[in-house]
Image (cartoon, helix red, strand yellow):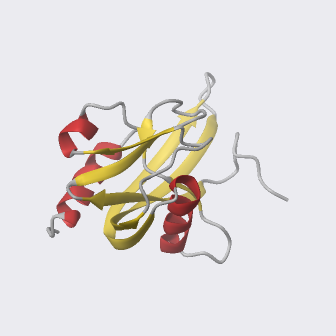
Amino acid sequence: MTESRAYPTRPFLAASAAVFRRGEVLLASRGRPPFLDVFTLPGGLVETGETLEEAALRELHEETGVRARIIGLTGYSDVIARDDEGKVKTHFLVVSFACEWISGEGEPGEELPVVRWATPEQAAALRLTPNLGPILDRGFALARGGA
């Protein structure tokens, strides 16, 4: 039986991919709540028997058609939303990876209706999901060959 994502009894584990190409990162706007129309990284839930890295790359390709290779870990983010009574409505732990682009331009879809490549300055000017700024900063540093 699949547990509901609303009012869960445990956090859901997810993975995302920050893909870098020629000084830009692939970002996409969310097509549904939470964070409708806010830019984020392609990603999704880790399936049983799948590593975090495999999940990040699978979700990236499923959602955007982009293929990439992981170059490093950029961090994680707890995404917790509470209702008006303070009860946990949703809780996701998202582990993010920096990736080097291999192929694909980034095709929009139902989950991610707007897909775009952005420089660090362009990304900073967008409405981003919580805690994404520092993850992008670490990803840009990794993509430039830094630590």
Left or right side of 136 for 36:
right
Q: Residue at x 54, y 30 (%)?
A: 36
Image quadrant in which you'd find residue 69? bottom left
Count of numbered tags: 0
- Front residue of this view, candidates 52 and 23: 23
Left or right side of 47 for 138:
left
| Image quarter (top left, top right, bottom left or bottom right) of the C terminus | bottom left
Left or right side of 12 for 73:
left
Q: Residue at x 58, y 32 (%)?
A: 82
Q: Residue furthest top?
A: 84
User: Which x, y percent locates residue 41?
Assistant: 43, 49
User: Which x, y percent locates residue 117?
Assistant: 33, 46
| Image quarter (top left, top right, bottom left or bottom right) of the N terminus | bottom right
Image quadrant in which you'd find residue 100? bottom left
Q: Residue at x 57, y 35 (%)?
A: 31
Image quadrant in which you'd find residue 113? top right
Q: Residue at x 48, y 52 (%)?
A: 42
User: Which x, y percent locates residue 60?
Assistant: 50, 60
User: Which x, y percent locates residue 99?
Assistant: 35, 66
- Front residue of this view, candidates 102 and 123: 102
